[in-house]
C-alpha cells in the first residue's frame, strides 16, 4: 500500500493545528514585541474551558468556541493591563521571565482548581473517521483544521481590511509613525495581546478533544509554537503558516520513512531551526506583521 | 555603611560559606549550600553570556551535557571523579565554541532560540540513543571509587568560588569593555577594532564549560541522570531567574540571586508542599512580583536603599522618552 | 560565622526545619516524598490520599498512637524534580531522622531517590509503592531494607502474555512503545515474553512521548495486520493514543494496555474508545479479596474498603491509592508489633508477616534482584460494554478471579 | 492674536542628556515657518516635543492657547497637529492607499476621509497612479510625497514637515517644495524643519535658527537671509556668549 497520500494528508491536517498553535504567539510578538511564555497556558485554559463545558453541561466544544474566544480575549487584555504593560520598556529577558512566572502561576492555579489529572473531551467526531480511497481522515482532525483555517483567515482579513487591523499592522511596523497617525499604541497592544490570547484559547478548544488535557500541556506546545514562529520569521503571519507546514511535513514524513522516525521527529524540528537561522538569520520570511 | 563595605563582607561571607560548610555544616546546611553553589555556577555562567549581549535560553544544554559526559566517562572508562569533571569542562567548552561558531552573527532573540534548539536537540539525542545514555529511563552512576559526599560537596563549593573568580577576572580585564560594547551594539564594536566572534567564542566557551561542570558535579551528587531533567527548561529558567533577581550584568547580582532563589524555593516548597500546586504557584507569583517591583534586582534595591540612606540628593532625572522606542 | 549573610542562611534554615518538635514523647516519623507539584502531581495527590487515609483509619481503629508514640507524617514536595528528591532523601535521613520512608511516586523521581538512600549507612526502612522500572531494581540490588510494594515492570508482561496465551500462539503481535521513561522501562520485557510465548512479532514501533499525531505509526501498523496491538505508553499519551487508535479503525481484535486502563483518568477521557482494551494491574474495583482474619478493620475486604473510600472521596480508588494505603498500614503494624523503630527488627517482622489486604497478599518475596517484593499479584481485565450501555472492567486472568472471558473487538 | 502653536522655554532630552536647552517659538494661523539648524541642533527633537512623541521636561507647549502637555501624542492628531516625520517613516508593507487610509485614523479625520482622499490624490497625481503599490518599493521622492499626503489625511491645522528634502535629488526637492507651497495655499499653517537653507527660505514667511538646543536667531525670511547668524548657527558655534553649552550633538541626529 502506498503511504504517500496518507502521509500528505496527515501532514496537512497537522500543519493546520500547528498554525493555530503558533499564530497567536506570532501576532503577540509582531505587535507587542514580547514572546509570551504564558501562551501555552492560554492553550491549556482554553482546553479546560471546552472540556468542562462539554463534561458538565454537554456543550460541544465547537459551540463553546466563540464564547471561549471572547473569554480568552478578556483574560489576555487583563493580563496585559495588569502585568505586561508595566514591563514594555524593560529588557527582553525581564519580559520573558515575567510571562514565564505568569505561566507557572496559571499552571498551578489550574492544579489547585482542577487537580493534575489528565482529561480529554469526547464528542463523537473526535474518534470517528472516513476513507477517501486509501486515505483515512479523522473527523476530529478535519474539524481542527477547519477551525484553524477559519481563524487564520479571519485574522488575516481583520489585519488587512479593518481599520483597527490596519492600525495594528502600523504599530507593528513603526510604532512612532503609528502614534503620529493618531493610533493609541497602548490600546493596540492591549488589543493584540487579547487577540493573541484568544487565539491561544481557540487552539486549546480544538485540542481539547484531540489531545490529553493536563495543567502542563501548554509548555511543550509553547516550545513547538516558538519553533514554528522562528522558522517562518518572527511576527510574519504567512511565515507562521509556512513554518507550520515545514514542521508538520518534516515530522510526518520522518515518522513514516525513517527508522524510529517519530522519536527523532522533534529533533529534526530543532535541526531545521538551527539550519534556517544560519542561512536566513531572520526566518524564512523576515520580521514584522505581514498578511 | 557604604556599598563597598557591604559588598566586600558579603563576598568574604559567601566564600567562607561555600568552602567551610561542607566541613562544618549540618546536613541541611550542607544541602542548601550545595544547591546554592550549583545555582551560583549556572547563574554566573548565564550572566557572563548575557554581559556580552548573548541571552541564552538553553543553559540546560551545557548542564545536561556535563552530566552525561561525566556519567559516560565514569561508567564506560572508569574515569575517576576529578578527571570526569575535567572531561565535562572540556565538553562544555567545545559545545560553547560550537555554539559561537554556528550562531555567527545572530543576536538577541535569534541567538536565544538557537540555544533553546540546541538544548532540545541534545535532549532528543539522549532519549533516542538509549544504548549510550540509558534513554528516558535514565542511568545510574557506577564509579569504581566513590569519592565521598564531602569531596563532592566541596567540589561544588570550589566550582562556585572558581566561577566567581573567573567572572571577577573578566570584569577586571580589558575584555570587560569589549563585552560591554558588544552588548550595546555588536556592529559598532566591530568598528572599534573589536572582533566579536573571537570574544563571543571565548565567552561561550568559558560560560559553557562552567555550566557543564555544575551538571557533572550534580551527577556525582545525585548519582542518577535522565534526559527530561538533565535538559529541563527549568534549569535554564532558574539560571536566568537568579541573575535577574539579584541584578543582571553585575558580579554580585547572580550570587545574591542564587541565594535568594534557593531560599525562596525551599521556603515555598517546605512551607506549602502539603498543598497540591501551591509551592510553584507562590514561586511563580514571587517571580512576577520581582520583575515588576525590583527591575534592577536585589543588588539594585540594596544600592538604592543605601543611596537613600546616605541622603545624597539625586539630580532631577529627565522625563523618559514617551515615543516608546 | 560573624558575617551578615549568615543571617540569610539561618533564616532559611529556620524555615527549612520548621518548628523543631520538642515533645517528650518522640513521635514515629514517616518521611513521605510526594510530588504535589510538577508533572507527577496526579500521582502525588493519590499517594497523599493513600497515606492520609491509612493514618486516619489507624487512629480510628487503634487510637492516636502507634507503639505508644504519636504518628507524624512528613509530606514533602518533590516538585517532580530529581535534584529536589535527592535533597529530600538526604534531609529525611540525616536531618529529620525519619523512621520509615514511603514513596516517592513518579518513575523518574523514584529512580533519583535510590542513590542518596543507598549511600547512607543509617538508612531507614524504605517502602516504594510507586516506581516499577527495572533500572530501580537493579540499582537497589539485594538491599535488606528496601521493600517494594508495587509490581515490577516485568510482572505486567508476564501476566499480560499469559492472559493472551488463551488465544493460541499463532497470533501476530504489534508492539507500540513511547520513547519516554515508561515505554523504555517496559519494552524489553514485553518483547521477551511475547517472543517466549511464541507469538509472531510483526511490528515494533516507537512513538514520541507527548506527540500530537500518532497517525504515521498507526498507518505503518495497519499495513502489518496484527491480531494484537500491545501498547506501552504512560497515561497522558495513552489517552490521546487510544482516541486516535479508535479513529484509525485498525480492525485489530485485541487491544492490550498496561496499568493505565485501570485509571479513572484514562477511562473518563477516552469515552467509547476504551471499549475492549485490556489492562493489567494490581488492583481493580470488584476484586473478591476477603478481609484479613487478624486485622479485619485495618484490612477489610476489597469490596468494603472500596466502599469506605468511595464514601470519603466520592470516587473509586486508583491502584496507587490502594498501594499507599496498604503499605502505610503495614508500616504502622510493623512498628506496633515490634514496639520499636529499629530497622533490623522491623525488617525481620516484615519478612515474616502475612496479611490479606485489599490489594492481596502482603507477603514479601524475592523478585529478580530485590529481596522484598509484595503486592505484585496482578490481574488482567478487559473494558467491556454491558447491555445497559455502561463500560466495566471484566476480570479475565488469572482464572481463579476471572469474571468473564477475553473478547475480540468488533468495530 | 494668540498664536496657533507656541513653545515657551521648552527644555527636553533623552535620559540624562538635555537636547533642547531653551526653545521659544510661535506659529500663527496661515503662516509658513521654517526651523533651521545644523545636524544635531535639536530640530527633530523640537518636532517630537510638539507632536508629543517626547515629553517636554519643562516649559510649555500651547496649541490654540491651551497647554497641551497632558495630551498624549495620539490625541494631538485629533487637535490637528500632524507630522510628516524625519526619514519619511512610511509603512513599507502597506500600499500607498493603505498608508493614506491610516493617515486618517483619528476620529476627526475619519469623518472627512473621502474629501481628504480627493484632495491628496489631487495634489499628488503620482500617488493616485500608484495607489496599489507597496510603499516600501517606491522612490525616495515618492515616499516623501506619501509622507506629506499621509500627514494631510489627518486634517491638520498645523502641518509639520521634518526635513522633507532629506536625501532627495535637487530636482525632486523643487517638486516637493512646489507641493508644499500648493498646500500652503489651502490655508494651513506649516512648520517645517530644514538644513537646506536655500530651499527653506524660498517659501517660508518666517524662520527660526536653532543652535545647540537654543533659538539662536529668528525673523522674517529676508532678515534671516541678511544675517550672518544663519551661517554661524550652521557651523554649530556661537560667538560672544563665552562657553558653548555641552553639545549632545549626536544624540538627536537620528
Image (cartoon, coloured by chain):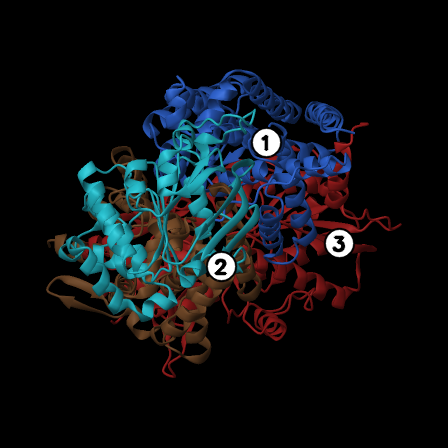
Chain colours: A brown, B blue, C red, D cyan
The mark closer to the camera, 3 or 2, is 2
Q: Name the residue under label 2.
A: D2
Q: Give the letter of the chain under mark 1.
A: B
Q: Give the letter of the chain under mark 2.
A: D
Q: Are marks 1 and 2 in contact (CB under 8 Å)?
A: no
Q: Distance between the residues labelled 3 and 1?
A: 32 Å
User: Eyeballing the image, is D187 above or below C403?
Assistant: above
The mark closer to the camera, 1 or 2, is 2
Q: Do the residues labelled 3 and 2 touch (CB within 8 Å)?
A: no
Q: Mark 1 points at which residue?
A: B38
Whether residue A85 is visible: yes
Percent of width and height locating residue B281: 59, 55
At 60% from the left edge and 42% from the top edge, which residue is drawn?
C84
Percent of width and height locating residue D67: 54, 58
Q: Give the letter of the chain under mark 3.
A: C
The mark closer to the camera, 3 or 1, is 1
Q: Dividing the image into 4 quarters, which one contains the N terminus of chain C?
A: top right
Q: In this view, does D93 lie to the left or right of C356?
A: left
| Label 2 environment density (alpha carbons within 10 Å; few <14, some 14–19, many ≥20) | few
| Label 1 environment density (alpha carbons within 10 Å; few <14, some 14–19, many ≥20) | many
User: Eyeballing the image, is C96 above or below C228?
Assistant: above
Q: Nearer the viewer, residue D211 or D163?
A: D211
User: Eyeballing the image, is B26 above or below D126?
Assistant: above
Q: How far apart are marks 3 and 2 (CA)?
A: 84 Å
Q: How many labels does the image show?
A: 3
Q: Name the residue under label 3.
A: C72
User: Eyeballing the image, is B159 above or below B245?
Assistant: above
Q: Which of B314 and C336 is in front in this view?
A: B314
Q: Which of C129 and D245 is in front in this view?
A: D245
Amino acid at each position: 500500500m502506498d503511504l504517500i497520500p496518507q502521509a500528505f494528508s496527515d501532514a496537512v491536517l497537522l500543519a493546520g493545528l500547528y498554525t493555530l498553535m503558533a499564530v497567536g504567539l506570532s501576532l503577540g510578538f509582531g505587535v507587542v514585541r514580547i514572546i509570551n511564555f504564558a501562551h501555552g497556558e492560554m492553550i491549556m485554559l482554553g482546553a479546560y474551558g471546552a472540556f468542562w463545558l462539554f463534561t458538565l453541561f454537554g456543550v460541544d466544544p465547537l459551540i463553546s468556541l466563540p464564547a471561549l474566544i471572547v473569554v480568552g480575549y478578556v483574560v489576555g487584555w487583563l493580563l496585559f493591563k495588569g502585568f505586561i504593560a508595566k514591563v514594555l520598556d524593560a529588557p527582553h529577558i525581564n519580559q520573558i521571565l515575567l510571562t514565564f512566572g505568569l505561566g507557572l502561576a496559571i499552571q498551578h492555579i489550574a492544579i489547585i482548581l482542577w487537580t493534575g489529572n489528565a482529561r480529554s473531551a469526547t464528542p463523537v467526531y473526535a474518534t470517528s473517521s472516513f476513507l477517501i480511497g486509501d486515505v483515512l481522515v479523522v473527523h476530529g482532525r478535519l474539524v481542527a483544521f477547519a477551525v484553524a483555517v477559519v481563524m487564520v483567515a479571519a485574522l488575516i482579513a481583520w489585519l488587512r481590511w479593518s481599520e483597527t487591523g490596519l492600525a495594528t499592522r502600523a504599530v507593528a511596523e513603526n510604532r512612532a509613525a503609528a502614534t503620529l497617525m493618531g493610533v493609541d499604541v497602548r490600546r493596540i497592544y492591549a488589543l493584540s495581546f487579547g487577540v493573541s490570547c484568544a487565539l491561544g484559547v481557540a487552539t486549546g478548544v480544538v485540542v481539547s478533544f484531540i489531545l490529553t488535557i493536563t495543567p502542563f500541556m501548554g509548555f511543550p506546545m509553547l516550545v513547538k509554537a516558538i519553533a514554528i514562529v522562528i522558522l517562518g520569521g518572527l511576527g510574519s503571519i504567512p511565515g507562521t503558516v509556512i513554518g507550520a507546514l515545514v514542521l508538520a511535513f518534516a515530522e510526518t514524513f520522518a515518522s513514516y520513512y525513517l527508522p524510529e522516525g517519530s522519536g527523532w521527529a522533534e529533533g529534526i524540528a530543532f535541526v531545521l531551526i538551527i539550519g534556517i537561522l544560519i542561512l536566513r538569520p531572520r526566518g524564512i520570511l523576515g520580521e514584522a506583521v505581514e498578511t | 555603611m557604604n556599598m563597598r563595605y557591604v559588598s566586600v563582607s558579603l563576598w568574604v561571607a559567601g566564600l567562607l560559606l561555600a568552602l567551610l560548610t561542607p566541613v562544618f555544616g549540618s546536613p541541611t546546611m550542607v544541602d542548601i549550600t550545595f544547591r546554592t553553589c550549583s545555582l551560583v555556577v549556572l547563574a554566573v555562567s548565564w550572566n557572563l553570556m548575557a554581559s556580552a549581549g548573548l541571552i541564552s535560553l538553553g543553559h540546560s544544554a551545557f548542564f545536561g551535557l556535563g552530566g552525561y559526559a561525566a556519567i559516560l566517562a565514569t561508567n564506560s572508562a572508569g574515569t575517576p571523579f576529578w578527571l570526569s569533571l575535567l572531561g565535562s569542562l572540556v565538553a562544555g567548552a567545545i559545545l560553547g565554541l560550537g555554539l559561537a561558531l554556528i550562531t555567527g552573527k545572530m543576536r538577541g532573540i535569534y541567538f536565544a532560540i538557537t540555544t533553546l534548539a540546541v538544548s532540545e536537540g541534545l535532549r532528543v539525542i539522549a532519549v533516542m540513543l538509549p544504548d549510550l545514555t540509558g534513554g528516558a529511563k535514565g542511568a545510574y552512576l557506577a564509579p569504581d571509587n566513590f569519592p565521598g559526599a564531602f569531596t563532592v560537596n566541596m567540589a561544588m563549593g570550589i566550582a562556585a568560588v572558581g566561577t566567581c573568580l573567573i567572572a571577577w577576572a573578566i570584569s577586571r580585564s580589558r575584555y570587560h569593555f569589549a563585552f560591554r560594547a558588544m552588548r550595546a551594539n555588536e556592529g559598532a564594536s566591530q568598528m572599534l577594532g573589536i572582533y566579536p566572534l573571537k570574544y563571543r567564542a571565548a565567552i561561550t566557551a568559558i560560560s559553557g564549560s562552567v555550566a557543564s561542570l555544575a551538571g557533572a558535579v550534580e551527577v556525582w551528587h545525585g548519582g542518577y541522570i535522565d534526559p527530561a531533567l538533565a535538559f529541563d527548561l527549568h534549569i535554564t529558567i532558574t539560571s536566568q531567574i537568579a541573575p535577574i533577581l539579584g541584578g543582571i550584568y553585575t558580579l554580585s547580582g547572580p550570587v545574591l540571586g542564587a541565594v535568594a532563589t534557593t531560599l525562596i524555593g525551599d521556603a515555598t516548597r517546605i512551607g506549602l508542599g502539603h498543598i497540591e500546586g501551591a509551592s510553584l504557584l507562590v514561586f511563580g507569583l514571587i517571580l512576577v512580583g520581582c520583575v515588576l517591583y525590583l527591575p534592577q534586582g536585589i543588588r539594585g534595591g540594596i544600592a538604592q536603599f543605601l543611596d537613600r540612606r546616605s541622603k545624597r540628593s539625586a539630580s532631577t532625572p529627565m522625563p523618559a522618552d514617551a515615543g516608546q522606542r | 560565622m560573624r558575617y551578615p549573610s549568615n543571617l540569610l542562611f539561618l533564616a532559611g534554615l529556620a524555615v527549612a526545619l520548621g518548628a523543631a518538635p520538642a515533645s517528650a514523647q518522640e513521635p514515629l516519623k514517616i518521611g513521605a516524598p510526594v510530588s504535589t507539584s510538577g508533572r507527577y502531581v496526579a500521582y502525588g495527590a493519590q499517594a497523599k490520599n493513600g497515606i492520609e487515609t491509612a493514618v486516619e483509619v489507624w487512629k480510628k481503629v487503634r487510637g492516636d498512637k502507634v507503639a505508644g508514640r504519636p504518628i507524624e507524617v512528613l509530606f514533602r514536595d518533590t516538585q517532580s524534580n530529581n535534584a529536589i528528591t535527592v535533597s529530600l532523601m538526604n534531609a529525611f535521613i540525616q536531618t529529620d531522622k525519619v523512621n520509615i520512608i514511603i514513596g516517592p511516586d513518579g518513575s523518574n523521581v523514584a529512580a533519583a531517590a535510590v542513590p542518596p538512600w543507598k549511600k547512607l549507612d543509617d538508612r531507614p526502612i524504605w517502602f516504594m509503592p510507586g516506581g516499577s522500572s527495572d533500572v530501580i531494581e537493579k540499582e537497589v540490588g539485594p538491599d535488606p531494607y528496601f521493600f517494594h510494594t508495587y509490581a515490577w515492570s516485568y510482572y505486567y508482561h508476564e501476566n499480560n502474555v499469559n492472559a493472551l496465551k488463551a488465544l493460541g500462539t499463532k497470533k501476530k503481535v504489534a508492539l507500540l512503545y513511547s520513547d519516554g521513561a515508561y515505554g523504555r522501562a517496559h519494552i524489553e520485557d514485553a518483547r521477551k515474553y511475547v517472543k517466549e510465548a511464541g507469538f509472531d512479532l510483526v511490528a515494533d514501533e516507537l512513538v514520541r512521548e507527548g506527540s500530537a499525531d500518532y497517525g504515521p505509526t498507526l498507518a505503518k501498523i495497519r499495513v502489518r495486520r496484527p491480531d494484537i496491538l500491545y501498547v506501552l505508553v504512560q497515561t497522558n499519551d495513552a489517552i490521546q493514543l487510544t482516541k486516535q487508535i479508535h479513529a484509525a479503525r485498525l480492525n485489530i481484535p485485541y487491544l492490550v494496555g498496561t496499568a493505565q486502563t485501570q485509571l479513572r483518568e484514562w477511562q473518563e477521557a477516552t469515552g467509547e474508545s476504551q471499549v475492549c482494551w485490556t489492562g493489567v494491574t494490581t488492583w481493580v474495583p470488584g476484586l473478591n479479596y476477603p478481609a484479613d482474619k487478624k486485622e479485619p478493620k485495618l484490612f477489610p475486604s476489597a469490596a468494603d474498603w472500596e466502599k469506605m473510600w468511595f464514601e470519603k472521596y466520592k470516587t473509586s480508588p486508583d491502584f496507587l491509592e490502594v498501594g499507599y494505603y496498604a503499605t502505610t498500614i503495614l508500616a504502622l503494624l510493623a512498628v506496633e508489633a515490634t514496639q520499636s523503630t529499629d530497622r533490623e527488627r522491623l525488617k525481620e517482622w516484615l519478612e515474616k508477616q502475612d496479611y490479606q489486604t485489599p490489594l492481596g497478599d502482603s507477603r514479601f518475596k524475592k523478585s529478580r534482584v530485590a529481596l522484598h517484593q509484595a503486592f505484585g499479584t496482578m490481574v488482567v481485565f478487559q473494558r467491556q460494554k454491558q447491555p445497559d450501555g455502561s463500560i466495566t472492567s471484566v476480570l479475565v486472568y488469572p482464572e481463579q478471579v476471572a469474571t468473564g472471558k477475553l473478547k475480540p473487538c468488533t468495530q | 492674536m494668540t498664536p496657533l502653536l507656541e513653545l515657551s522655554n521648552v527644555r527636553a532630552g533623552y535620559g540624562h542628556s538635555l537636547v533642547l536647552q531653551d526653545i521659544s517659538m510661535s506659529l500663527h494661523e496661515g503662516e509658513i515657518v521654517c526651523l533651521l539648524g545644523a545636524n544635531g541642533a535639536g530640530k527633530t527633537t523640537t518636532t517630537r516635543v510638539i507632536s508629543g512623541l517626547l515629553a517636554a521636561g519643562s516649559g510649555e507647549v500651547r496649541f490654540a492657547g491651551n497647554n497641551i502637555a497632558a495630551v498624549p501624542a495620539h490625541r494631538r492628531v485629533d487637535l490637528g497637529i500632524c507630522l510628516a516625520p524625519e526619514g519619511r517613516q512610511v509603512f513599507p508593507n502597506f500600499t500607498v492607499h493603505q498608508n493614506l487610509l491610516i493617515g486618517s485614523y483619528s476620529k476627526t479625520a475619519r469623518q472627512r476621509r473621502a474629501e481628504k482622499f480627493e484632495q491628496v490624490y489631487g495634489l499628488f497625481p503620482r500617488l493616485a497612479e500608484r495607489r496599489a503599490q507597496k510603499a516600501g518599493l517606491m522612490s525616495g521622492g515618492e515616499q516623501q510625497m506619501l509622507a506629506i499626503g499621509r500627514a494631510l489625511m489627518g486634517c491638520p491645522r498645523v502641518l509639520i514637515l521634518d526635513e522633507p528634502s532629506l536625501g532627495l535629488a535637487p530636482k525632486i526637492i523643487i517638486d516637493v517644495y512646489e507641493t508644499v507651497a500648493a498646500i500652503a495655499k489651502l490655508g494651513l499653517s506649516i512648520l517645517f524643519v530644514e538644513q537646506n537653507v536655500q530651499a527653506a527660505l524660498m517659501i517660508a514667511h518666517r524662520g527660526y535658527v536653532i543652535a545647540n538646543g537654543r533659538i539662536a536667531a529668528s525673523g522674517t525670511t529676508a532678515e534671516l537671509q541678511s544675517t550672518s547668524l544663519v551661517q554661524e548657527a550652521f557651523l554649530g558655534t556661537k560667538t560672544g556668549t563665552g562657553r558653548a553649552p555641552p553639545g549632545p550633538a549626536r544624540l538627536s541626529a537620528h
